[in-house]
Image (spheres, rainbow, N blue to C red):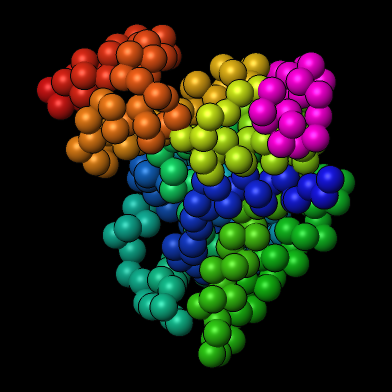
Amino acid sequence: METRDALSQILRSLRLSSGLISRGRFSEPWAVHTGQNTSAIFHGVVEGGCTARRDQDVDAVTLAPGELVVFTRGDAHTVSDGSGARPVPIAGLPARTVGGLSEVTHGGQGPTSRVLCGRFSLDHAATTLEDLLPPVIVIRRRQTGMVEWLDTTLELIAFELDHRRQGSDEILTRLTDILFVQVLRAHALSLAPGQGGWLGSVHDPRIAQALAQVHEAPDRAWTAERLARQVGMSRSAFHARFAELVGETPSRYLTRWRMRVAMDLMRSQDLSTLELAERVGYSSEDSFSRAFRRINGLSPSAWRRARNT
């Protein structure tokens, strides 16, 4: 049986979204502060260097050219040259629009650093980056195999920004998506089995294929046995491998995923309990309500009331 690219297949089912926010040209001494964001925020160094620190952290991370930091919760943070300069809110700095992207120039008369800033998110409310990643991820040049792709991707983004032509917008979108996938892949491959939720499945394309099918069609009558057949494994081998890589049994993951999809639907649509049940693979309101209460501690109707109060 032919299996497809594991990480790409799962990300496709979760509606990967990314984009550039701005690029900065900062001359020493300099320090800028960014407030809380709803998406993960990344900073990649193209030239020079910087330090980056979340407001709640004591220590900062130091980045060289071709290195990148991701604040996966979008936490407020400061990026600077490390000199102790007083941070200035970046939202209050004058910016010009160059090729459709905000460009900020700030600092003194010293050496200049160029830093790209962008956002990452999964636009499917049933999962978030908080489920998958630690609050801060740093990708270093010295990590095995990282320098080639990270350097190249950041340089390509910077080049495309400096040489805007027909098709640049689409190229930049694709490059930023690639950057996100590369970061997730680098982190996923560093995980031990059972860590990272579904990210751990990238070690096995068959398990990833099963997860992607659950994500794409939670309303199907899935069972561990049916998923195992779908990916060409015995039930026992599938159950053991799934639990090893994902950190929970197939049935537990399936139920939890369906309940999160149901909450997503309740946030966005006015559906009856029966309609919700059918949309996430349950044949009766009772079975759906029991599963919902088991996962969330409340019935669907109580959850709605609590959310609306």
Residue pictured at 35% horizontal, 27% vertical: 277
Q: Foreground residue, 159 or 194?
A: 194
Instruction: Give the quadrant of residue 235.
Output: top right
Question: Can I make out residue 175 in this image?
Answer: yes
Q: Among all residues in the image, which is located at the extreme right? A: 144
Residue pictured at 75% horizontal, 63% vertical: 151
Relative height, residue 44 to residue 234 (above, below): below
Magenta stretch, residue numbers: 225-245
Instruction: Give the quadrant of residue 184.
Output: top right
Q: Foreground residue, 231 or 196?
A: 231
Q: Foreground residue, 47 or 155?
A: 155
Q: Provide residue 5's location: percent of width, then percent of height.
A: 75, 50
Relative height, residue 30 to residue 282 (above, below): below
Residue 35 lies in the magenta-colored region: no
Q: Among all residues in the image, which is located at the extreme left? A: 309
Q: Foreground residue, 127 or 76?
A: 127
Instruction: Give the quadrant of residue 229.
Output: top right
Residue 105 appears left or right of 243? left
Prevailing SS of the magenta stretch:
helix
Q: Provide residue 128's location: percent of width, then percent of height.
A: 48, 37
Residue 237 appears left or right of 25? right
